Amino acid sequence: MSIPVIAVNNIKYPATAEQYLEEGVCDFVAIGRGQLADPQWGNKARDGRDEEIRKCLGCMYCFNSLGLQRPIECTVNPYVGREYIFDEEDLKKDGDGRTVAVVGGGPGGMQAAVLCAKRGYKVTLFEQNGALGGTMLLAAKPPHKEMISQLIKTMEGELGRAGVKVLLNTKATVENVGAIKPYGIILAIGGSPIVPSIPGIDAQNVCTAEQVLSGEVSLSGRKIAIIGGGVTGLETAEVLSQDNTVTVVEMKKDVGDTLYITVKMLLLNALKSAGVTILTGQKLTEIRERNVFLSAVSSNESSVLEADEVVLAMGVRPNRGLAEEFEAAFPHVTRVGDVSRPAQIADAVREANDKAWIF
């Protein structure tokens, strides 16, 4: 969610607690979800360590977990609701300076690297791109997702303070990772977009949501069919709807099923206002130059949708090939994040934390 702004005497103030107090807008501020995201919020703010605060994303993942009758969870704080299990005072600092290689600088890789460093391991993180963040870099692109960029910056700072050596623009191989003689390896190499094997899938008018969000593919003034109504598909639709005619096609009966209801309705209302059409219960069967062919899941009834461009947002599958190479070459390897099980940022951070805690 975007940071709200208030106006006092015609002066606009960002709705951050620190600035409320500094500018004299109010005498005290109550923090709710921010304390779940970082229980040390108050201490860090008092000490002027704003950049160290893991800030609430406004994703409502905490409310969603409660709605599912699970213990409370948080996207950015893997400890919340489990503090009795993960107490930093009980963290085994038994790394003894042994080398650990973390491959991948997304949310799972960064979380694992920081925790391993706190345990006393000498950690080197390999990231093939020129920036840390992994899929969070793309997740921060749609409207109102700016706080994800803040999370990336916060986790980058944690790596530096923990003493993790970060190698950007460095594709990890069995050879260069082996050269540092690692005691163990944590693979956070993510997944690849799912591309179904159907007629026309290799056409020039077909791309992935990742290519759109990264800027690799630019589309304007086109009729676009987005295949997949998950979070990525819906948010890509919001981006593209600014200057295209967009239709989202989803196999399930509903879209955005992993989103908290409030967040989901805000997004769907934005898409409706932008003129985005959503088709549910429809399966993609074929792509041609100006059309996509669909089949109703319930009846197999065929239909044709006119589209100049097709954007695939059908999820990701683990990069198992590279993972298996490392597992064959080294004795102590573990997978975290999408390479283990494709899911959300919260799942990657939580899994990385739990596995690094006992690595």
Image (cartoon, rainbow, N blue to C red):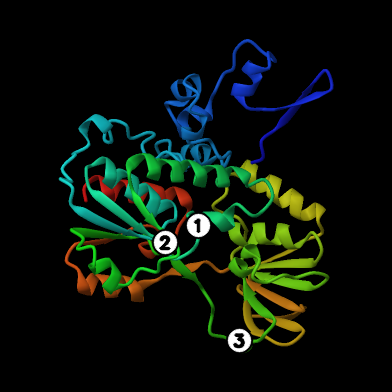
Q: Position of residue 285 (x, y in %)?
A: 62, 83
Q: Quadrant of the N terminus?
A: top right
Q: Specify whether residue 295 is in view.
A: no
Mark 3–mark 2 distance (CA, rounded to whole Å): 29 Å
The local secondary structure at tag 1 comes to loop
> Disc count in the image?
3
Q: Specify whether residue 274 is in view.
A: yes
**Viewer-proximal residue, 31 or 330?**
330
Q: Position of residue 187 (x, y in %)?
A: 32, 62
**Residue 145 horizontal side relative to residue 343, left or right:** right
- Three-letter code, disc 1: Ala
Dots 1 and 3: beta carbons under 8 Å? Answer: no
- Three-letter code, disc 2: Glu
Decide: few, some or many residues near mark 2? Use Cα within 10 Å; few <14, some 14-19, many ≥20.
many
**N-term mark: 1 or 3:** 1
Give the residue displayed 80% in from the left and 66% down from the top. Answer: 244
Mark 1–mark 2 distance (CA, rounded to whole Å): 8 Å
Quarter where residue 247 is shown = bottom right
Quarter where residue 176 is shown = bottom left
Q: Which residue is denoted by mark 1 in the rendering? A: 131
Q: Which residue is denoted by mark 2 in the rendering? A: 127
